[in-house]
């Protein structure tokens, strides 16, 4: 479409384009040829409401495919899965007349308690960003625009509409922003959705540092920023900050505020024009023709994609896969009425819904196995739980194996609130303990959007399958993993700790009195557990398979300066084909800031037949070695040693190579507040000072210095002005001032790859 000539529009018309017409659509201006477009959720399927509207998933929507939510896609560690989810949503978006589908969510899982973790991929920014970019590219490839959300630092539901996330810049840059950055740079999303919360005291919807300096000026975002539904606090400040489209509409109230602000001179009309241009450009995503999609085909796809999100956590004595001729007691209400998606705005009215129980029965028939079923509990606790437990125990004791489906219900986790415990409901824990005693073998299947505690029963059961929330095809996918028709290949995208108290955000989550302090800094998830050596039940990256893999031949070639190429060979050493995730971590202690013990810097998933091997190449660019330097306001690769590690998870390194990088040549401007250590450590000035000191010292001072070689260490952290006050004129002030001047002159080119 042609960009309209804004000069033909009145200020009122322009302002009107910057907020929604209703809950899900923008305004049209027929005279100017500007169409209305539909924006709707969401992240794992199209929630198109035809009747009453809401953003909490209360009212119904038209049936569409409920694809695996992000929690399952994250555990797949497979960009192809993310892309196929995105493409299917894109196709359905076209079928429902949707221009922009609101997703994916790439917020970091800071605490396992966040009620919305099921909508996010991972505790790691690389994994989140790579999957998010794949989703967006594929979805937009089908013509439906994306809205990557919720920008930024929206990592909890408690007080989400007003809490201020207090996060230092290094932590934002290294943990909370990179997934957005990657999606913006690699996938060019139509829109970015700003979050409800404040970031360091300023609402995201009015935060020009986020929405303009970082998003547009630094990352080159060319699309429109849309508010989360109802996230606007001060509309005029929002326009100034770069927040283009307010959703839903405000009945004209905020449009008028924009008009008034322009008229009073408080808001520049150019900013309004810029926002209008960006909003109007979104009409390019308006579907020209209504396409159809094949409901059965998409259901089959939902099944296939779900299987890769399943993580096999424990499999003692090869309890799984189930074998032919077994008597199987399927227990647990979730087997019959699966929990397959989370509550809230992402809630889909599915076209079909697989029951795990039915899928197990179907497969059992083929394998001459017998299935008995007992619900064991009611999800809302409203039944006669004791009788249900007894009935389940009796079924388990007369079976060869019990497969117990436990998890969290909609009451336990959802958008809109956070959990306050990691524990499963107590009736389910009691059930698990009783079944583990009664059954010859016990398999536990978990359905949960956020991590649950495995303590109190873990050691008593033979196998544990983490099924997360898998979408409408999850029941079939689970049965195929249990019977070995699919080989599990999911890996944890988030750590399962022993105790909630072990989680690094524990003392600062969800904050208090309007503030949540991200006190753990960059030490989020495994970055903390590995660095502080805190044992966990299952580490980030962990996942078993029905086959085995070996890793050999790691070679790492540094480019000398700030990057490396990596090559590694993996082999399927087992008896059946399977998929393996190669996880590449970088570890270093060099540089002036504390680094996590290791950080994921690249990954890929490969499919290997039994006995097959494959050599895989990676390129690690400078970001793979860099930290964010708050003094310089830049990414810096400090010179030194870096260990490139292949891990089967974040705490198990199976191969490593150390390389040396020259890193960046850094000269920081010196002031009288800089410490003696800074002055002497400065690459140019340091030497000048050493020489100057040698010449200026009396024989007596030189003798003293020789007798006390640690003398410099004692004054190293002293600001130079205080040092001078103690020592008098070892360095004449004019000399220091001229040296300072030199360092300031160099300050525009502080970071130079050496
Ligand atoms: C959620 C968004 C969602 C929007 C529209 C909000 O409450 O935070 O993720 O896209 O509603 O439903």
Image (tube, rainbow, N blue to C red):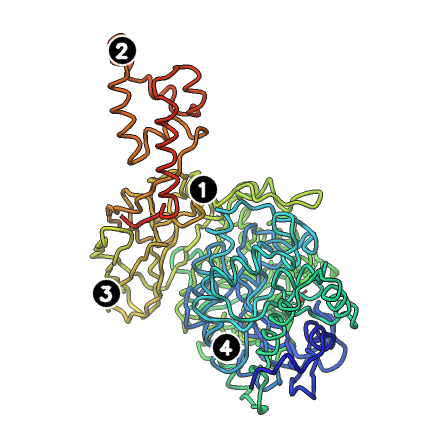
Check residue 376 in the rendering and tell me which mark sits there, or answer none.
none
Instruction: State the residue lying farthest toward the top.
Output: 700
Position of the N terminus, as image quadrant, is bottom right
Q: Which residue is mark 1?
A: 631
Q: Is residue 746 above or below residue 291?
A: above
- Give the crowd class for mark 3: few <14, some 14-19, many >=20 residues within 10 Å: some
Mark nearer the viewer, 4 or 3: 4
Q: What distance separates the C-alpha of mark 1 from that of mark 2?
A: 37 Å
Mark 1 and mark 2 in contact? Answer it, CB < 8 Å. no
Mark 4 and mark 2 in contact? Answer it, CB < 8 Å. no
Question: Quadrant holding ligand 1?
Answer: bottom right
Q: Which residue is mark 2?
A: 698
Q: Quadrant of residue 393?
A: bottom right
Residue 481 visible in rendering: no
Q: What distance separates the C-alpha of mark 1 from that of mark 4?
A: 39 Å
Foreground residue, 628 or 308?
A: 628
Mark nearer the viewer, 3 or 2: 2
Q: Residue at x 42, y 25 (%)?
A: 720
Q: What distance separates the C-alpha of mark 3 from that of mark 2?
A: 65 Å
Is the distance from the Cβ of mark 2 to the nearest ligand 1 atom less than 8 Å?
no
Foreground residue, 284 or 57?
A: 284
């Amino acid at each position: 479409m042609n960009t309209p000539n804004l000069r033909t529009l009145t200020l009122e018309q322009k302002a009107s384009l910057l907020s929604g017409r209703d809950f899900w659509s923008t305004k049209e201006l027929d005279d100017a040829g500007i169409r209305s477009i539909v924006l709707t959720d969401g992240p794992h399927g199209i929630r198109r409401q035809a009747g009453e509207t809401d953003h909490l998933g209360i009212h119904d929507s038209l049936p569409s495919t409920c694809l695996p939510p992000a929690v399952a896609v994250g555990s797949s560690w497979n960009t192809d899965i993310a892309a196929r989810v995105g493409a299917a949503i894109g196709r359905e978006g076209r079928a429902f007349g949707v221009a922009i589908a609101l997703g994916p969510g790439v917020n970091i899982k800071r605490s396992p308690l966040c009620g919305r973790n099921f909508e996010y991929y991972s505790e790691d920014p690389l994994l989140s960003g790579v999957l998010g970019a794949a989703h967006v590219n594929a979805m937009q490839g089908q013509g439906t625009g994306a809205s990557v959300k919720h920008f930024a630092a929206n990592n909890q539901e408690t007080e989400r509409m007003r809490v201020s996330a207090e996060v230092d810049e290094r932590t934002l840059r290294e943990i909370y922003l990179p997934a957005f950055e990657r999606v913006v740079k690699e996938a060019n999303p139509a829109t970015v959705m700003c979050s409800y919360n404040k970031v360091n005291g300023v609402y995201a919807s009015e935060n020009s540092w986020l929405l303009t300096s970082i998003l547009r000026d630094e990352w080159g975002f060319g699309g429109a920023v849309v508010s989360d539904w109802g996230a606007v606090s001060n509309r005029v400040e929002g326009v100034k900050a770069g927040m283009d489209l307010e959703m839903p509409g405000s009945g004209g109230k905020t449009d008028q505020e924009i008009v008034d602000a322009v008229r009073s001179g408080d808001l520049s009309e150019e900013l309004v024009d810029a926002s209008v241009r960006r909003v109007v450009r979104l009409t390019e995503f308006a579907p020209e023709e209504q396409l159809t999609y094949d409901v059965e085909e998409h259901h089959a796809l939902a099944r296939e994609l779900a299987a890769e999100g399943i993580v096999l956590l424990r499999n003692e004595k090869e309890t799984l896969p189930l074998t032919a001729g077994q008597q199987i007691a399927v227990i647990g209400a979730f087997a019959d009425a699966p929990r397959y998606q989370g509550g809230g705005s992402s809630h889909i009215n599915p076209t079909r819904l697989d029951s795990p129980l039915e899928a197990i029965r179907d497969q059992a028939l083929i394998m001459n196995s017998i299935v008995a079923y007992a619900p064991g509990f009611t999800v809302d606790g409203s039944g006669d739980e004791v009788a249900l437990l007894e009935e389940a125990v009796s079924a388990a004791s007369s079976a060869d194996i019990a497969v117990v489906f436990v998890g969290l219900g909609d009451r336990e986790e959802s958008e809109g609130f956070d959990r306050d415990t990691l524990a499963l409901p107590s009736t389910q824990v009691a059930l698990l303990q009783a079944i583990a005693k009664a059954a010859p073998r016990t398999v536990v299947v978990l359905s949960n959007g956020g991590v649950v505690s495995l303590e109190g029963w873990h050691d008593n059961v033979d196998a544990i399958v983490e099924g997360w929330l898998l979408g409408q095809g999850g029941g079939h996918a689970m049965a195929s993993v249990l019977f070995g028709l699919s080989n599990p290949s999911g890996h944890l995208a988030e750590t399962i700790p022993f105790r909630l108290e072990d989680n690094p955000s524990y003392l600062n989550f969800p904050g208090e009195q309007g503030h949540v302090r991200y006190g753990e800094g960059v030490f989020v998830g495994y970055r903390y557990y590995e660095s502080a050596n805190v044992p966990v039940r299952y580490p980030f990256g962990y996942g078993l398979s029905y086959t085995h893999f070996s890793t050999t031949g790691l070679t790492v070639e540094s480019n000398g300066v700030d990057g490396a190429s990596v090559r590694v060979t993996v082999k399927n050493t087992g008896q059946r084909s399977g998929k393996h995730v190669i996880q590449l971590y970088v570890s270093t202690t060099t540089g002036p800031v504390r680094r996590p013990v290791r950080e994921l810097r690249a990954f890929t998933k490969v499919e290997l037949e039994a006995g097959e091997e494959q050599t895989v190449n990676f390129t690690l660019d400078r970001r793979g070695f860099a930290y964010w330097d708050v003094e310089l306001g830049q990414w810096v690769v400090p010179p030194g040693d870096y260990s490139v590690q292949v891990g089967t998870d974040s705490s198990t390194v199976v191969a490593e190579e150390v390389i040396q990088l020259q890193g960046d040549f850094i000269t920081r401007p010196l002031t009288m507040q800089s410490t003696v250590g800074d002055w002497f450590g400065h690459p140019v000035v340091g030497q000048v000072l050493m020489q100057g000191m040698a010449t200026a010292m009396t024989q007596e001072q030189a003798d003293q210095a020789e007798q006390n070689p640690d003398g410099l260490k004692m004054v190293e952290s002293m600001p130079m002005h205080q040092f001078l006050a103690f020592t008098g004129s070892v360095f004449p002030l004019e000399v220091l001032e001229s040296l300072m001047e030199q360092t300031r002159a160099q300050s525009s080119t502080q970071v130079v790859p050496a």
